[in-house]
Amino acid sequence: MAVWATVVAAKQLGADCARIISYANSGDSTVGRHDRVVGYGAMALSRDAKCQTDSPDSSQMEPYSEELTIQQKRRLLELARKTIEHALYSDMVPLPRSDNRLLVQPRGAFVTLKKSGQLRGCIGHMAEDKPLCQVVSAMALQAAFNDPRFEQIRPDEVTKIDIEISVLTPFRQVPDAGSIRVGIDGVRLRKDGRVAVFLPQVATEQGWDRDEMLDQLCRKAGLPVGSWKEGAQLYTFQADVFSESELAYHQTDSP
C-alpha cells in the first residue's frame, strides 16, 4: 500500500519520470545464493521532460577499455577490508555494489593478504563472469577465512594485515615458455587435468627466473618438476596490482 500511495501521489504532483537509483537482491551478497532471494530497490519519481529510464547493463559493457583510477582502486581496497572486518565483528558482510561502470564490469581478480611482508592468504577468481566489486568482496572473504594453507584471520591481526588486489586481464594461450615475460606476465599451467596459477609479481618477489618459476608452478599443480617442457598448456595474463600500503590507504580520505 505504501508503494502504491507513493506512485499515486507522485502522479498527481506531475511526476513523469522514474529512475532506478539502486537495485539488488540477497543473492548479490558475497555469501548469498541466487536460487532463493529477496529483492531490494530504490527509485526516484520526478518531473523531467528528458527522462531516460534505461539503466546500464554491466554484462554488456566491454571490459578492459580503461584503467582503474586511484579512487577506484581505493574503493576496492575499502570494500575488501570492510568485508573482512564485518565478517569478523558482526557475522555479516557488506553488499558489494557500485554505480561506477568500471567496478561492475565482469573481471577476474585475486585478493592477497600480507602480514609483516609475509603471505597470510591469497585466493582468486579467474573467470570473467561476475562484477569486479563482487569478485573482490568474495575473494577477500575467502583469503581471510578459507585459504587452506593458513589459519583464519583473527581480530587482533586485522590492523596488521596489508591488503593487495590484482585485477586480471583475460588469459591468452602462448605457444611455448619463451613467450613468457617474467615480472610482467602471470602464468597459468594446465596438464593432465592439473592446473596452477602464479600472479605476475610472484616470480619477482621470489627471485625466480622463468624456468624456476615454471618448475615451482608444476610443484603447485602437483606435477613433477620440468613437466612444463612437454605436453603442458601455458597461458599468460597481466594484472593491475595495488595495495593499501602502496596507496597509503590509511593516510588518505576515502573517495
Image: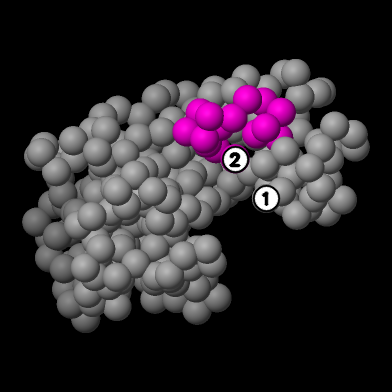
Sequence-wise, the earlier of marks 1 and 2 is: 2
Task: Tell me if residue 93 comes above or below residue 11 in the rendering.
Answer: below
Decide if residue 233 is on the left or right side of residue 198. right
Q: CA distance from mark 1 to mark 2?
A: 9 Å
Left or right, 10 with respect to 120, comes to left
- Residue 201 vs residue 144: left or right? right
Q: Residues within 10 Å of mark 2 (few under 14, many from 20)?
A: some
The answer to if 54 sits in the magenta stretch is no
* Image-quadrant location for residue 35: bottom right
Q: Main secondary structure of the magenta part?
A: helix
Closer to us: 50 or 245: 245
What is the span of residues highlighted in magenta in the rendered image? Answer: 198-214
Q: Report x, y in % for residue 128.
A: 58, 44
Q: Which residue is mark 2?
A: 198
Magenta-drawn stretch contains 210:
yes
Disc 2 marks a residue whose amino acid type is Phe
* Residue identifier under label 1: 220
